[in-house]
Image (cartoon, rainbow, N blue to C red):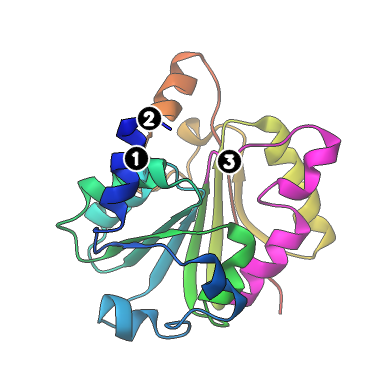
């Protein structure tokens, strides 16, 4: 492991806006499960997650644009989280959580989350990797548990494959599709938060790729 990566891991241990649970802590629920607003953010504002946040570009920009909303960027890669955590140290409405997405139920209580963003996840095109897609039914069942009844999930991707796959899964699970487009920036549904562009998204657009979008929630 390079010295630069080691330094980043060292920094993360001292960042007040980063939570890195130890493996033994995952044997039980997180200490502040159900109390993120009171204990972590110290306010009553809504909570939004970005799953697989990478370097946190999207999470940080969302937090800057919406100071009245609490944001949590989630990724398992510490070296990636370091970038967003470094940039947002002065913001009071953002934290980064280093964990696997399949463990979300250990960190968040039923209905504790108001909005989930999934931005440019790996589509895992090979059939044997289907269960790793972040819109696989197993993940969707987790999201349904932690999302409030009035909450939504937003999927933004350059993958037509993942877009189509997700629509199929949502249909089979009787989820409600609020918005869907194969070409976000030439549609009428692009909100100010949808317009945020990461480094890799800018590259996709320069290559002529269309950005797709789905907004959905769950039937109860």
**Circles 2 and 1 in contact, beta carbons < 8 Å:** yes
Q: Is residue 170 left or right of residue 118?
A: right
Q: Which mark is residue 6?
A: 1
Residue 64, given in percent of the width and then of the height, sits at 22, 53
Cα distance between the residues tagged 2 and 1? 6 Å
**Circles 3 and 2 in contact, beta carbons < 8 Å:** no
Residue 61 visible to an observer of this rendering: no
Residue 207 visible to an observer of this rendering: yes
Quarter assignment of residue 104 = bottom right
Q: Is residue 102 above or below residue 8?
A: below
Which quarter of the rendered picture does the C terminus lie within?
Answer: bottom right
Q: The magenta stretch spans which residues?
A: 119-147
SS assignment at label 1: helix
Q: Nearer the viewer, residue 113 or 184?
A: 113
Classify 10 Å Cα crowding around label 3: few (below 14), some (14-19), many (20 and above).
Answer: some
Task: Tell whether position 209 is magenta.
Answer: no
Q: Residue at 61% x, 66% y: name it.
A: 103
Classify 10 Å Cα crowding around label 1: few (below 14), some (14-19), many (20 and above).
Answer: few
Residue that numbered label 2 is attached to: 2
Which quarter of the rendered picture does the N terminus lie within?
Answer: top left
Q: Residue at 70% x, 38% y: name it.
A: 162
Q: Is residue 61 above or below residue 97?
A: above
Cα distance between the residues tagged 3 and 2? 26 Å
Quarter assignment of residue 24 = bottom right
Q: Which mark is residue 121?
A: 3
Q: Is residue 88 above or below residue 104?
A: above
Residue 78, given in percent of the width and then of the height, sits at 42, 47
């Amino acid at each position: 492991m390079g010295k630069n990566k080691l330094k980043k891991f060292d920094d993360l241990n001292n960042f007040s806006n980063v939570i890195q649970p130890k493996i033994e802590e995952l044997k039980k629920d997180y200490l502040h499960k159900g109390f993120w607003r009171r204990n972590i953010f110290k306010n009553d504002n809504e909570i939004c997650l970005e799953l697989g946040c990478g370097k946190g570009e999207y999470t940080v920009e969302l937090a800057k644009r919406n100071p009245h909303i609490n944001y949590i960027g989630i990724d398992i890669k510490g070296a990636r989280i370091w970038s967003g955590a470094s940039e947002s140290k002065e913001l009071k409405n953002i934290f980064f959580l280093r964990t696997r997405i399949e463990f979300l139920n250990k960190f968040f209580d039923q209905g504790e989350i108001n909005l989930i963003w999934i931005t440019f996840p790996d589509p895992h095109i090979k059939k044997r990797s289907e269960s790793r897609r972040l819109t696989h039914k197993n993940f969707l069942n987790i999201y349904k548990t932690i999302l409030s009844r009035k909450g939504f999930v937003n999927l933004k991707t350059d993958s037509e494959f993942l877009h189509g796959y997700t629509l199929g899964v949502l249909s089979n699970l009787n989820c409600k599709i609020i918005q869907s487009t194969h070409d976000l920036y030439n549609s009428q549904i692009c909100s100010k938060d949808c317009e945020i562009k990461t480094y890799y998204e800018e590259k996709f657009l320069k290559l002529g790729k269309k950005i797709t979008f789905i907004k959905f929630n769950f039937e109860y």
